[in-house]
Amino acid sequence: MIARTVRRERGWEELLPGLFRFRDTCNVYVLMWDGEGVAVDFGSGAWLDALPEIGVRSIRHVLLTHVHRDQCAGLAKQGTWPFEVHAPAQDLRFCQSEGLAEFWRTYQAGGCPASYAAPRAPLPCVRGDVGEAQDVLWGEARFCAIPTPGHTRGALTYVTVWGGKSVAFCGDAVHEGGTLHQPYHLEWDHWTAQGALVAWYGLERLGACRIDLLCPSHGAPVKDRPGECVRRTQRRVMALVRAKGSVCAGAPDRWFATESMACGVRRVLPDLYPFGENSYLLVGDRGEGFVVDPTLPGVEGVADLMDRVGVRRISAATASHYHRDHSDGLNWLRDRYDAEVWLHPWVAGPLQDRNRDDLPWLPADSVTPDRLLPEAGTFRWNRYRFQIWPFPGQTWWHCAFQTEVAGQRVLFSGDNFQPPSRWNGTGGFCSFNGSRFSEGFSRSAATVLELSPDLICNGHGCVYRYSAGHYRRILRWSERAERAVRDLCPSEAWLADYDCRGMAWVPFRSETRPGETVALQFQVRNHGKKPTSVSVAAVLPEGWTAVPGRRRGIVPGGKTRRFGFEVRVPKGVKAGRCVIAADVEADGVPLGEAAVALVDVEG
């Protein structure tokens, strides 16, 4: 996130007569006529004090291209403003008290959020009155709204003619060089290309317009061949769409037919039984059972299965990855059968403290392991000897393990790779899930090729026979997918743009009471090679305080550093969920409210 920052001076840059850019937490553009102005986007609002420098006495309208914190957080400083603020109609719920409160209340209820950068506080001054065929008029100027969704569902580009030139204020639909600012915003869910597809179509519409000057929210305005910049971005977005497709195109399905037993259960192999949505029961000696990937409510059916196959007790259980549909039955098995929970260290990380990180698909409760398995090595349960490895892909916090069952080498490998006809052969990739390519999917596919198992038992009922050709296709796909993401990122250190947790509060969620103090750390990852200077201050609800007020420090290239704060909650604060943010500058560049944390105040 911070690798590409370049020290710069705030101030006005005249792009055309009467059209100026101010480099705030985003680019703010002001068009001026006879002392009155219209602004596109708002940022922190620092530009308001500098208006006299360009001869603007008053602002009539502010047009928001999309509702993200870097575009509009400064509007929360006042309830009313002496100008009209217009926003995309589809983004309005993130400005309204009720809609925003519901968004943050349900934030960790599922997978990818509806916004990765929703405002911290409501913006009552904003009107959601702009959309398809809803233009804004100012004097003789008409701001035509073109839907260019991607960063948000409602994101708009405003096209106007100014000084005889066609100017497009495109928000974050395009960045100079045919790239995208923080392209992970196009990942509307954890596996499909839905967000990228609608972004592509928005660029298709924008590219058909005459554009003489392209004014993006981040990066420099594009004066030289702006239409080609739009088309180059569009081609790269389509490469992302294709990367979100099949990971093993052309590979045949090799489904393994499970056997229906006379006792009414299905069997993969002697002593190996699938059950529920994602789970497996492995039968050992002395009536013991070992459960892989227990999930509620399906795990509750294990009792009937145990009776039918002669298992008297579940002695241990594990999960291939932390997602709740593979792990939320672990505590239930421990409570019901006194089973021990054995976890790979990578999987244990998010599960031991489910409030630590901002991650998708977390279980409702933390899971404390009874035993940490080797990061890479072997372990034994009953008569079975397992080999275990990190297995990043769909999510970083993933493992795989192999053992021999009835003479067959069986690999339990979660959700990374599926049969070709199931979900494009994968559980998908997205930044919010911690997905990586050369470090993730490629590494895991190479592990499978080295192991050469006979049978693969994955989640969601996917049992199939191994084929080396299938996994070699995955290796080639992983290279293409990483290239597609890299090409969209403006920074040479591409993870600076694609890592949605490059800056984050730790823990992400805290519980406290009125009058208490919450200890928080702000974590900064520098994905670049050079050190960067960082300045951080906590942005808090009214009446809250933080010590110190601001932290400053250097983050070396390739390193991570944390900055500690003690946040004091007022005694009279009402119970409920509060959202705090971090105001960040990196090498003198204002990034605005770069990350948020949730603080739940109990009554």
Image (cartoon, rainbow, N blue to C red):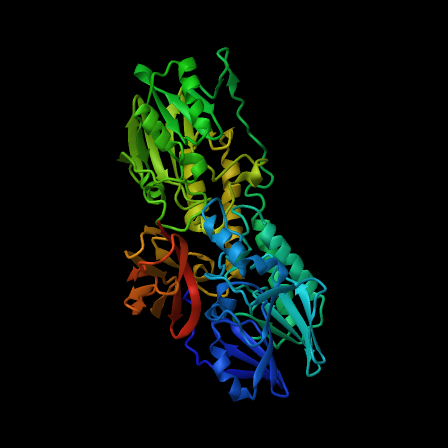
Task: Give percent across and percent down for residue 547.
Answer: 27, 66
As drawn, 14 above or below 6: below
> Looking at the image, which residue is at 42% across and 48% down?
359
Q: Is residue 413 visible?
A: no
Task: Give percent across and percent down for residue 146.
Answer: 68, 65
Q: Is residue 279 visible?
A: yes
Residue 16 left/right relative to 503: right
Task: Give percent across and percent down for residue 131.
Answer: 67, 62
Task: Give percent across and percent down for residue 269.
Answer: 45, 20
Q: Quadrant of the N terminus?
A: bottom left
- Quadrant in the picture for residue 214: bottom right
- Count the numbered circles shown: 0
As drawn, 498 above or below 2: above
- Front residue of 270/7: it is 7
> Looking at the image, which residue is at 47% across and 58% down?
498
> Looking at the image, which residue is at 41% across and 37% down?
450
Residue 466 left/right relative to 504: right
- Front residue of 119/556: it is 119
